[in-house]
Image (cartoon, rainbow, N blue to C red):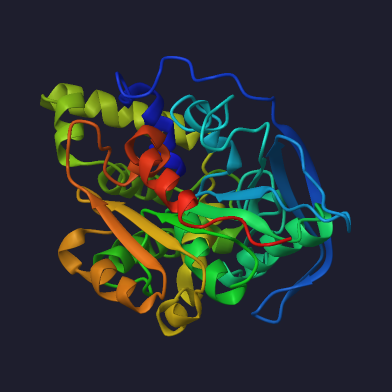
Amino acid sequence: MRALSLLLASLVLGLATARGAEYPAPVEADFILRDFRFASGESLPELRLHYRTIGRPQRDADGRVRNAVLILHGTSGSGAQFLRPEFAGELFGPGQLLDAAKFFVVLPDGIGHGRSSKPSDGLHAKFPRYGYRDMVEAQRRLLTEGLGVAHARLVMGTSMGGMHTWLWGQLHPDFMDALFPLASLPTQIAGRNRAWRRLVIDAIRLDRAWQGGDYATQPPSLRTAIGMLWLMSSNPPLRQKAAPTLAQSDQVYDAFFAELSRTLDANDFLYALEASHDYDPAPGLERIRVPLLALNTADDLINPPELGILEREIRRVPQGQAVVLPLSEATRGHGSHTVAPLWREHLRALLERSPPAAR
């Protein structure tokens, strides 16, 4: 999640290099999907999908790109969250696992996020209600229509992007060689995960200052939303270490709120949370054909291992494997998904057991 990403730069000490390996500068652009129709029946004359690419596409004899790696971000984040030393600096440099000299890395901003079309652009609460399947469809069209990608070497994602990865595997089972969902579960949003989202959704919608989405200044309920991000996005030992006294706790929390409130919009966040309404990959897990490695951490409050869901459901994926990393000084709760040194070797093993499809 974007909130966690804002903390990682200060929290990840001694794990990632102070300055990651050099990799080519990202190239940014917009892809316009005209008359995009959402599953709700609503539509937009123009849906803008912003994206970043790193590396160059390699085309086959038919001119189709086949060395693409699609990486998908979390709720309220954007593709920009991966451009940090502990992620891009550990993966995209010369000789690294996703070396940009070999791979064409695509980092889109999902619908409603980053610099893609979103409620805060002007439509506010009149923006179409989008779901995760709409987001995946827009990603697919970006790759196929916008970038000429016929087949992906890898689809991976973090948090919401991890959930999108599960959907990619069953909606487009022949499109990629491998799937790597991080910090996610292959089941619909329920239990505590639904409760904290519902708390934020209700806080915003029931706030008189929200004014049906047409507020001039951010409603006070945005503070509640940011507070829930604070609670859910890391693990207790790290929170205690960063804020060991009452005064320090208030200082750290206030700094977190001040940082996020500069960019987080109540409508955008409300929509982003509600977008999970159509997420339920469980009925289609057997349709996932390619090797899949799902990776979570034991200190993830959003996807706690005590539920046993990942271990149960992964058995239904024909080439599925699951790894839950134990709590350690290196893990960062839910935000471990963006710290590549934690799980890089697991990704390496996945790529080794999923050779590129025949051209």
Residue 95 x %, y %: 55, 27
Q: Is residue 109 left or right of residue 209?
A: right
Outermost top residue: 18
Residue 99 x %, y %: 60, 33
The answer to which of 145 and 108 lies nearer the viewer is 145
Residue positioned 68% across, 31% down in the render = 101
Residue 146 x %, y %: 82, 55
Which part of the image, by quadrant, shows the C terminus? bottom right
The answer to which quarter of the image holds residue 26 is top right
Residue 287 x %, y %: 50, 80
Q: Is residue 14 left or right of residue 105?
A: left
Q: Is residue 62 above or below residue 281?
A: above
The answer to which of 316 and 191 lies nearer the viewer is 316
The answer to which of 337 and 58 lies nearer the viewer is 58
Q: Is residue 113 above or below residue 339?
A: below
Residue positioned 20% across, 51% down in the render = 298
Outermost left residue: 245
Q: Is residue 228 left or right of residue 146?
A: left
Q: How many marks overall?
A: 0
Outermost bottom residue: 283
Q: Is residue 121 above or below residue 18?
A: below
